[in-house]
Image (tube, grey):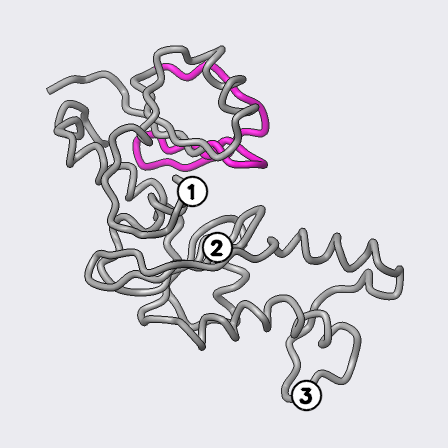
Amino acid sequence: MNNEKLILVDIGNTNFHIWENGYIYDLKQADKLEGRVFYISVNEKKEKEFLSLNPDAVNLKEYVKFDTDYKKLGIDRIMACKTVEIGTVIDAGSAVTVDFMKKGKHLGGIIFPGIFAYKKAFATISDKLNKDFRKPDDFPISTEEALWSGSIGSIICMIEKYGIKPVYLTGGDGKYLNQFIDGIYIEDLVFKGMKQTLIENGKWRMYNEK
């Protein structure tokens, strides 16, 4: 068994998400990592920055197997869904993605703006829309409730239309959405998919997981 430290990196549009011996943290800027590094990326510019410091890092996109008819499905979404046999997978980051799985097959998915993107967009329309969101009890009767209904409410509507239970949430705003959506929050869901990819390619047992 290889005693070299294993590090998984999920390069997003905002942060570098790092998994290291079960500990998860974020970096705003790329850094040199000491260990055997496997990564995925949805941001070409950040990926080049990362590889300039970690030239031996291995892109798992080349190794992953995933059953879907969705053309050019993002690798972050693939990894989030990779270990889900049946259910709805919500990854709430810079964008909110909602994907549907059944019998290990990806049926399709939806992309929404992220929570911050919704708030930023509303604020650019009018200062009067620069408000916090608030969930209504029934019909929206305030601007705060109307903003919630037009953003988070629209996400919930699509989940109710297409959703398959159970619902799994991950990503930076996953806990926030979990207040309104009956589901299970799993912080390391993307990393679980990356680990599964390593297992399928016979690489996981080469490293110690502490």
Element on which disc 3 rests:
loop
| C-alpha span from label 3 to label 2 | 26 Å
Label count reads 3
**Number of residues whose C-alpha sits closer than 10 Å to that of mark 1, classed few (under 14), some (14–19) or many (20 or more):** some
Question: Which circle marks residue 74 in the picture?
Answer: 1
| C-alpha span from label 1 to label 3 | 36 Å
**Number of residues whose C-alpha sits closer than 10 Å to that of mark 3, classed few (under 14), some (14–19) or many (20 or more):** few
Tag nearer the camera, 1 or 3: 1
Element on which disc 1 rests:
loop
Which tag, 1 or 3, sits closer to the chain's start? 1
| Residue that mark 3 sits on | 139
| C-alpha span from label 2 to label 1 | 10 Å
In the rendered image, residue 150, in percent from the top left (x then y), is placed at 67, 71
The part of the chain drawn in magenta is 11-34
Q: Amino acid at mark 2?
A: Thr
In the rendered image, residue 90, in percent from the top left (x then y), is placed at 43, 58
Tag nearer the camera, 3 or 2: 2
Q: Nearer the viewer, residue 200 or 145?
A: 200
